[in-house]
Amino acid sequence: MDHDNSECQAPPEGPVLCINNCGFFGSAATMNMCSKCHKDMMLKQEQAKLAASSIGNIMNGSSSSIASEPVVVAIVDIPVNSIEPKTISVQPSLASASEESGEAKPKGGPKRCDSCNKRVGLTGFNCRCGNIFCAVHRYSDKHNCPFDYRTAGREAIAKANPVVKAEKLDKI
């Protein structure tokens, strides 16, 4: 009894390396390629098909022959307002420039506590009165805060809990 080798073949004895020599193992389902090489090959084929179809469309003169590609056309009217040039008069005055810079606090300077003038940097506490304080003076009773916490609390509670009044029932 001779067996024909063409009828049925046994699976290969060992794992098959990827035909792209990437070092991973391939399978017959992915044409003896690893999953990554097979995915890359499929993407290249799709891109080649799209490129060929777009070149064919350009050669034929049609903008889009594939129905799945959406075409977006929009007409936008933008009103153009005329801009009038404004003239700014600059008066060189050294006295006014020094007064303005003296009154305004330097924005880039170090942050300091309003009570003790201690440098606080990033650890300063912002109070509701709008000032910055150190750890010692952060509480409202330590720096004589003018902010009225009692009124603010009452307003917050009143806003969060509106008055609910039921309709009166008619007596039978």
Image (cartoon, helix red, strand yellow):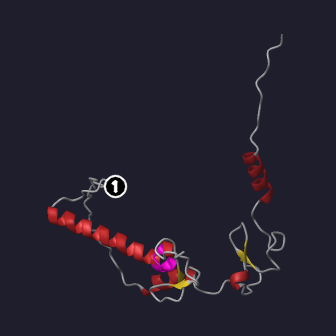
Residue 33 is covered by the magenta coloring: yes
Q: Tell me the quarter of the picture where residue 45 sits.
A: bottom left
Q: Which residue is denoted by mark 1 in the rendering?
A: 68
Q: Which residues are magenta?
A: 30-37
Please say whether residue 80 is visible from this viewpoint.
yes
Query: Quick check: 26 left or right of 90?
Result: right
The quadrant of the picture occupied by the N terminus is bottom right
Q: Amino acid at mark 1?
A: Ser
Q: Quadrant of residue 136?
A: bottom right
Q: Secondary structure at mark 1?
A: loop
Which is more toward the observer, 97 or 56?
A: 56
Asked if residue 76 lies left or right of residue 150, the reply is left
Residue 162 lies, with reference to residue 139, above or below; the image says above
User: In this view of the protein, which residue sits in the foreground, 143 or 65?
Assistant: 65
Query: Residue 60's x, y, as percent?
Result: 15, 62
Instruction: From the top left corner, tell me how far across and down residue 44 is, in percent.
Output: 37, 75
Residue 8 within the magenta-colored segment of the rendering: no
Q: Nearer the viewer, residue 6 or 35?
A: 6
**Would residue 41 appear left or right of 118 to someone viewing this image?**
left
Identify whether 98 is placed above or below 145.
Answer: below
Asked whether, in this view, residue 32 is left or right of residue 87, the answer is: right
Q: Residue 16 appears at what percent x and percent y?
A: 53, 84
Quadrant including the C terminus: top right
